[in-house]
Amino acid sequence: MAVLRSLLFYLVFYTGSIFYTSGSLLVLPFSARAFRKVVRGWAQFHRACARVLLGMRVRIEGDVPDGPAFYAIKHESFFEAIDAPAQFRNPSVFAKEELFSIPLWGPSARAYGLVPVARDQGPKALRTMIAAAKELVASGRPLVLFPEGTRVPHGTGPKLQAGFAGLYKLLGLPVIPVAVNSGPLYHRRWKKSGVITYRFGEPIPPGLPRGEAEARVHAAINALND
């Protein structure tokens, strides 16, 4: 059953994604608002496909703040990356640069305000990220960062990447840590039914020493590790 569910999910979601990404680029020259609605619709379509075809439900724990915020999220699968426009209002996500070369999706992601992260460029990449982040914060958009830098197996807690500390220090925003346990269900060829939980931690105020801020974020985003 898991194999059949997964094959149907791949067929429906990825075929539908072609129409959503194409549609977003078609409406972009005429209406930025319509463009954002199409992107959010794509993320909601993904969540619906996961619920109906895979039997996955989403559970929210903790308080989700209103308005601009800096979210540091555990990254176990593509689920939380695709789901971000459904979970947050018009978020700007820091994503690895290679993803922006995907046909249709890449140009749409850039237009939406996702920030490419060139992990091999060191300080230059950090300066670019900070400049983009400040502009986005000024426009009132929430920032979404996966501080571990890439997808990690469920139950593991690698060190945070250096880019998080740089953004935390220079943006001066509270950080909302978010634990996610999508890995056991979604990060597999034949996906499983069950509940994916987002657990929103207590806001971490700006201005803390780097070590303390990183330790608090690390503990909070790993709160759902088994």
Image (cartoon, rainbow, N blue to C red):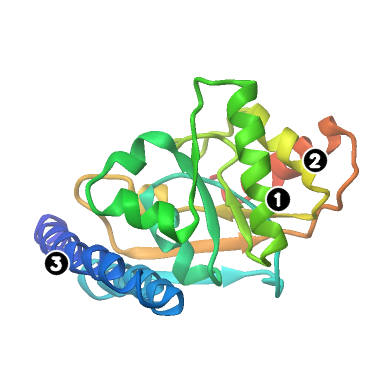
Q: Earlier in the sequence, mark 2 or mark 1?
A: 1
The percent position of residue 176, horizontal first and vertical second, equals: 71, 57
Q: Residue at x 80, y 55 (%)?
A: 174
Q: Residue at x 10, y 57 (%)?
A: 7
Identify the element where label 3 is drawn. Answer: helix
Q: CA distance from mark 1 to mark 3?
A: 37 Å
Q: CA distance from mark 2 to mark 1?
A: 9 Å
Which residue is denoted by mark 1 in the rendering?
Answer: 134
Q: Is residue 43 above or below residue 145?
A: below
Number of numbered discs overlaid on the protein picture: 3
Labels 2 & 1 near each other (Cβ < 8 A): yes
Identify the element where label 1 is drawn. Answer: helix
Q: Earlier in the sequence, mark 3 or mark 2?
A: 3
Query: Any mark on residue 170, and which?
Result: 2
Can residue 160 be spotted in the picture?
A: no
Query: Any mark on residue 12, and which?
Result: 3
